[in-house]
Image: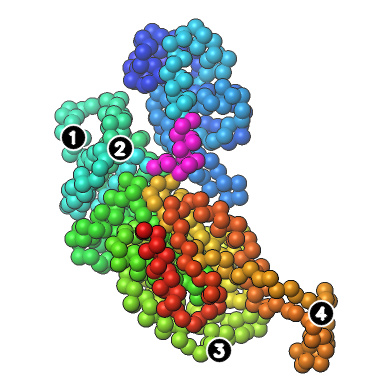
Amino acid sequence: MENLDEIVNSLRHSFLFKEQSHQQIVEFIALGTIIDLEQNQTLFSEGDPSDALYLLLSGSLVAYSCLNRTKQKIIIGYIRQGELVGEIGALSSQARTLSIDAKQPAKLLRLETQTFFEKLEANPSLFTPLTSIIISRLGKSAARKMGQHFSKVTLLISNQVSSDLTAFVNEFSQALNELPIKSRVLEAKDFAEHFKQNASDQEIIQFITELAEQNDFVFYCLDHQDKQWLTHCLYQAERVIVMVNDDDKALSKPLLPLLEHQCQHLRCELLAVHRDGHTSKPLSRISNTFQFELHHHVNLEDKKTLQRFCRFMTGKMKGLVLSGGGFRAWAHIGVLKAYIDNNIDIDILGGTSAGAVVAMLFAKYRDINTIINKLHACFNVNPKELKKYTLPVISIMDGEYQTNSLKELFGEVAIEDLDLPCYCVSYDLTHHTQYVHKQGLIWQAVRASMAYPALLPPMIINGDMHIDGGITNNLPTDVMDKLFMGSGNITAVDLGEPVDVSDVKHKFPPILKLKTMVAYKLGLRHQDYKFPLLRDVIFDVMFCGSYLGTKQNLQYADNVLMPKLEDFSIFTREDPDKMIELGYQSVIQSLK
């Protein structure tokens, strides 16, 4: 076999074979069949029979699961040189529970299950490390289900070759050193200093593997021209951060194909580094070319923004999720005011419907009085302006006032241009799935998130129909948990069920003729009929699916705030100051 000695020497550093001799490893390899995978090629898929197990000889693999409806890939973990693949399925004779693709070109040893068992009997010294590997992998699997999995190795790639990368790395390293973690930040010059002469691929892989084992977090900070080190760091990275500055007009030509092909199985985020505290050009000019999971802004003159980025990088971020709830959303403002007054960090905001409005307003203005004044300006209008009716082809109201108000509140600002990360959710009627708005124009995203079915027209974005996110997810903590990769701290603000439970008994027949209804309205007959308001019926139907979802999503929250809003309905426009105070007090009570 080509490069057999090199493969054997690399396997001797792995946990499974560290006590095995060179000859024992050679004999083990001889039992199986060598297979090669191209980048992104699938080894096996979820549901396939577990007819063999594999040993990764070189390259790296990614394990993932697919959502049934959307086929979206959920990354579970990464497999590196010297690790076993599919051993649990082979031992249990159960179908594959995950899919495995080649993250990079990979060489594997395929072993029939029976052959492997026979080798274990002949060489019992393999049994102890194998047991430890299985126990460790099962523990990691349980941790992921409990929301305790987080990227340990991050590759930060500068979009351009500039002094900004070095300046950022210096500030970033200093901020990390202030945290109670063991971390390492390396640039290209650090690799060059360590390998003073040409090093083999195996030596470099061994170096970066040891770094990951010795530290809580490792950050490789390179520019897109550091091709020699990029290739090896991509081998180990679990997350990629693309760094741009205010002078960047687009992603560099070499970087885009790297993201699209070599980073297909990696979580990719975008970092904008500023020096004057303001984004001179909209970040949307770059984010439109690639779908990033998160957008970060760091101002090198503002230490708080760098500290926030560090919390995101080390799994210590703090998020606030605001539920939908109509005019009850005034209570959200009280919660935010209490956070500011008590110096509680907010690193990211998420929300649905009215919660989305408040979340985006705070992310944009960061000033409570400004937010209150702008909302009062929106709501202090003739109620007739809020209820302009139209021919009910697709909705009862025309949506003019709601749309124009959101345009006035947010202008043409995009979500990714907000200094504070933010998202909201809507329901995509075209594809029958939840949609998370993390980029694009704020007013469009919020308008989609609050498009009450039948009352307001759906919001069309890229040809797809979006309606109120509260239909299925009125408290999107699950979205934040996914963004957090199960780490961090999430506080949920639940404004209660959108429509109050009623003990009123209704009375009317199953057939309602027009003549009967006209007579009832004129008071001529059937005065004992008891009808619900059409508005309440619509809202009850709209939110019935989200009641259970909200209860389920509370499991993702570390803290839950429930302002006492029993005296207010989602339609109550009176006494917003009282609702603000109730929201404020819910925070104060939680701090005691």
Dot in front, 4 or 1: 4
Three-letter residue code for mark 2: Asp
Please give the residue where the numbered disc 2 appears in the rendered image.
216
- 281 or 561: nearer the eye? 561
- Per the rendered image, the range of residues in magenta is 138-150
- Quadrant of the frame with the C terminus: bottom left
Specify few, some or many for label 2: CA neighbours under 10 Å numbering under 14, 14-19, or 20 or more.
some
* 579 left or right of 44 in image: left
Please give the residue where the numbered disc 1 appears in the rendered image.
192
The Cα–Cα distance between marks 4 and 2, rounded to whole angstroms, is 68 Å
Residue found at x 58% / y 82%: 398
Three-letter residue code for mark 4: Leu
Q: Earlier in the sequence, mark 4 or mark 2?
A: 2
Instruction: Pinpoint residue 138: horizontal percent, then vertical percent.
Output: 49, 30
* 460 left or right of 126 in image: right
The Cα–Cα distance between marks 2 and 1, rounded to whole angstroms, is 23 Å
Residue found at x 23% / y 65%: 277
Residue found at x 31% / y 59%: 345
* 154 left or right of 290 in image: left
- Check residue 354 for magenta coloring: no
Q: Earlier in the sequence, mark 2 or mark 1?
A: 1
